[in-house]
Image: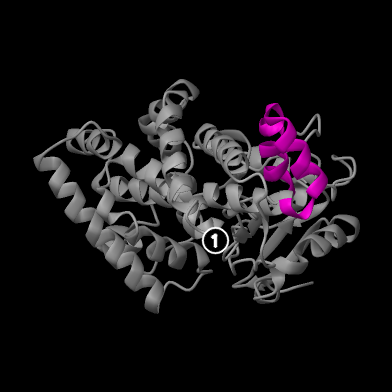
C-alpha cells in the first residue's frame, strides 16, 4: 500500500511505468491511503479504468456526498471557480454546460482552423530558423496551442504569456490550495473579470462573448459557471496539447527508427499522434471520481465517499490490451488508447489537439530534417498530467 504522498514525489514520473506495471500484475485496484473514514483507490488496468470512466455510480460532484464548512455562494471567487468546472460536475449540469461549448469544438469547426494553425506553426518555425538550438517547449509546443485557444476565446495577444505562470502553478499543485497557488488563481480570476467587462461592453465574434451572452440570459450559464468554463478552457485548451507535442517528439527522438519512418512518410502522422497519446499520455490520471454508494467494484469493496483515480497512463500500457505495450510503434493498429478519456467526459478538445499535433509534427520535421535531442529532458512534477520541463534540441 502506498500513500498519496508516496506516489506524488519529485521523481515519480521517471519510474511511473514500472510502478504501473507492477500494480497491474499484483494489485490493479490499490489503496493509496485513508482519510476521515474513506479510502483513495488507484485503478491501473485497461478494462477496469474503462469501466470506471463509464459507470454512473462513480460521480464527479463531491458536494453530493460531503457537506462544506461554508456555503459555496459565500466563498471567494478564486475558490468558487473550482466548484463549477464542467470536468467535475454530473448530468444534467454537465450536459447543459457541454452543449454550450460543443459547437465550437466539433470536427467541422476545428477543420476550418487548419489554415490559421498552419500559419501560426510557420511563424514559430521561422523564428526558430535563426537558432542552432531551441527549446521545443518554450519556442513551439507552448506558444502554438496557447495562441490557438486564445484566438478562439478572444484573449488579446499581449495577454497570452500571462497564462503560462498561472497555468503552471495550477496544474502543478496537488491539493494545496494555499499560498502562491491561490495568489495565481486570484490573479487569473481578476484578469477574467476585467476581460469579461470589456466583452460585455464591446462583444466580439469569439467564444467568450458567446458565453457571456448565455450568462446574461440567466438561464443557461450562471456567473460562477462562466468563470469556471473559461478558466477550464484556457488551461485544458493548451496544457494537454503542449504535452502531446513535447511528449510525442521525445518519443520520436528516443526511437530513431520511428522518427526516420515518419520523416520518410508523412501519411503516418495520424498514427504517430495516436501512438504518442498512448505511449506518453498527456493526462496521467483522470480527475477524481467518488463512489456514490457502497458497492463492490472488480472484487474490491468500496464505501460511499471513497475517491477513485483512473491511471490513464497505466491503462494505455496494459499488456492485456496492447501487444508489446512498452514499444513505441507509429504503425500500431488497432490502437484503442483512452488518452482523451471515455464516456460523457471524453475530452471536448480532442479534435483540436489531434489537428494541432499533426500540423506540429509535420511542420517541425519538414523544416528541420536533421533535428535531434540536445540533452535529456526532465518530467515536470505534476500529479494529473505528464509533460516536460523543456525539450532542448539541435536544429
Q: Nearer the viewer, residue 280 or 211?
A: 280
Asked which quadrant contains residue 32, the reply is: bottom right
Q: Nearer the viewer, residue 388 or 22?
A: 388
Point 34% across, 45% down: residue? 150
Quick one: label 1, few (<14), some, or many (20+) residues within 10 Å? Answer: some
Percent x, y of residue 225 = 32, 46
Secondary structure under the numbered disc 1 in the rendered image:
strand
In magenta stretch: residue 266: yes
333 sits left or right of 116 in the view: right
Percent x, y of residue 331 = 80, 33
Residues shaded magenta: 253-279
In magenta stretch: residue 362: no
Percent x, y of residue 366 = 60, 38
Q: Is residue 381 above or below residue 194?
A: below
373 sits left or right of 88 in the view: right
Point 46% across, 28% down: residue? 114
Q: Which residue is mark 1?
A: 135
Q: Does the magenta stretch mainly form a helix, a strand or a loop?
A: helix
Q: Residue furthest top?
A: 108
Res. 64 visible in picture: no
Query: Where is the N terminus found, in terms of image quarters?
Result: bottom right
Q: Is residue 271 above or below residue 325?
A: above
43 sits left or right of 55 in the view: right
Amino acid at each position: 500500500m502506498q500513500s498519496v504522498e508516496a506516489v506524488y514525489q519529485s521523481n515519480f514520473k521517471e519510474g511511473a511505468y514500472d510502478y504501473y506495471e507492477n500494480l497491474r500484475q499484483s494489485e490493479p485496484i490499490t489503496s493509496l491511503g485513508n482519510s476521515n473514514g474513506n479510502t483513495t483507490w488507484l485503478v491501473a488496468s485497461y478494462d477496469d479504468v474503462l469501466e470506471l470512466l463509464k459507470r454512473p455510480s462513480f460521480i464527479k460532484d463531491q458536494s453530493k456526498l460531503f457537506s462544506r464548512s461554508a456555503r459555496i455562494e459565500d466563498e471567494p471567487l478564486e475558490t468558487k471557480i473550482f466548484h463549477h468546472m464542467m470536468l467535475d460536475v454530473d448530468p444534467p449540469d454537465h450536459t447543459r454546460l457541454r452543449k454550450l461549448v460543443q459547437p465550437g469544438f466539433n470536427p467541422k469547426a476545428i477543420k476550418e482552423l487548419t489554415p490559421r494553425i498552419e500559419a501560426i506553426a510557420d511563424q514559430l518555425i521561422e523564428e526558430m530558423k535563426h537558432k542552432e538550438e531551441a527549446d521545443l517547449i518554450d519556442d513551439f509546443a507552448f506558444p502554438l496551442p496557447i495562441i490557438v485557444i486564445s484566438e478562439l476565446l478572444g484573449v488579446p495577444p499581449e495577454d497570452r504569456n500571462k497564462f503560462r505562470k498561472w497555468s503552471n502553478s495550477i496544474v502543478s499543485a496537488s491539493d494545496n490550495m494555499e499560498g502562491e497557488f491561490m495568489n495565481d488563481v486570484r490573479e487569473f480570476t481578476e484578469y477574467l473579470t476585467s476581460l469579461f467587462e470589456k466583452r460585455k461592453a464591446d462583444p466580439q465574434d469569439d467564444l467568450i462573448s458567446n458565453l457571456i451572452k448565455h450568462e446574461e440570459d440567466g438561464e443557461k450559464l450562471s456567473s460562477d459557471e462562466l468563470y469556471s468554463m473559461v478558466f477550464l478552457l484556457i488551461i485544458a485548451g493548451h496544457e494537454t496539447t503542449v504535452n502531446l507535442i513535447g511528449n510525442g517528439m521525445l518519443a520520436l527522438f528516443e526511437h530513431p527508427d520511428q522518427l526516420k519512418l515518419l520523416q520518410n512518410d508523412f501519411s503516418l502522422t495520424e498514427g504517430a499522434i495516436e501512438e504518442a497519446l498512448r505511449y506518453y499520455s498527456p493526462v496521467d490520471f483522470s480527475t477524481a471520481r467518488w463512489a456514490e454508494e457502497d458497492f463492490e467494484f472488480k472484487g474490491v469493496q468500496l464505501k460511499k465517499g471513497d475517491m477513485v483515480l483512473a491511471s490513464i497512463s497505466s491503462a494505455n500500457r496494459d499488456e492485456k490490451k496492447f501487444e508489446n505495450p512498452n514499444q513505441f510503434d507509429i504503425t500500431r493498429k488497432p490502437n484503442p488508447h483512452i488518452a482523451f478519456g471515455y464516456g460523457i467526459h471524453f475530452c471536448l478538445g480532442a479534435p483540436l489537439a489531434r489537428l494541432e499535433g499533426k500540423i506540429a509534427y509535420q511542420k517541425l520535421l519538414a523544416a528541420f530534417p536533421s533535428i535531434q535531442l540536445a540533452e535529456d529532458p526532465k518530467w515536470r512534477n505534476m500529479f494529473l498530467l505528464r509533460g516536460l520541463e523543456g525539450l532542448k534540441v539541435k536544429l
